[in-house]
Amino acid sequence: MPKGQDDPVKADTVRITLKVFGGLREMRKASAEEYVVPANATIGDLWAKLATESPDFAAKLRNGIASGYLNALLNGRNISLLAKDQTKLSDGDVLAITPPVGGG
């Protein structure tokens, strides 16, 4: 379950914010949620945590990112340009999940 701002964070954990947009936002009923994960956690560990707490939501995220339909941006950088699921999370990180943006 997401942790709120007032919850204490242990020294061996980090707090990250997950932001979602589009249909995912409607699915979650919120645009941003905070999670507390172990200090050495990766994005893959966050996906596993989400799979336990909200399997349908986690499946949509993983499938959307794997297919290229969704982009995962850690502090504004696409995780496909980082270490993907093995990217380490740090305290205060913001992970944004966005649908593709087109224009013309």
Image (cartoon, rainbow, N blue to C red):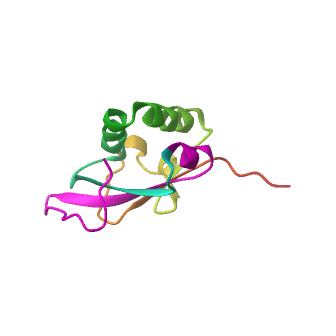
Q: Quadrant of the C terminus?
A: bottom right
The answer to whether residue 82 is visible is: yes
Give the residue furthest to the front. 29
> Is residue 103 found left or right of 62 in the rendered image?
right
The answer to whether residue 71 is visible is: no
> Is residue 8 found left or right of 104 in the rendered image?
left
- Check residue 11 for magenta coloring: yes
Q: Residue 13: x and y, percent? A: 19, 57
Q: Is residue 38 above or below residue 63?
A: below
Quick one: 62 or 84, which is closer to the camera?
62
Give the residue furthest to the left. 11
Q: Residue 35: x and y, percent? A: 32, 54
Q: Is residue 68 above or below residue 88?
A: above
> Is residue 86 found left or right of 69 in the rendered image?
left
Quick one: 19 or 79, which is closer to the camera?
19
Q: Residue at x 76, y 51 (%)?
A: 102
Q: Residue 95: x and y, percent? A: 44, 55
Label count reads 0
- Check residue 7 for magenta coloring: yes
Q: Residue at x 53, y 39 (%)?
A: 65
Q: Residue at x 33, y 52 (%)?
A: 2
Toward which corner of the image does residue 15 lie, by quadrant?
bottom left
Q: Residue 37: x and y, percent? A: 25, 51
Q: Residue at x 25, y 60 (%)?
A: 14
Please provide the residue range marked out in magenta.
1-27
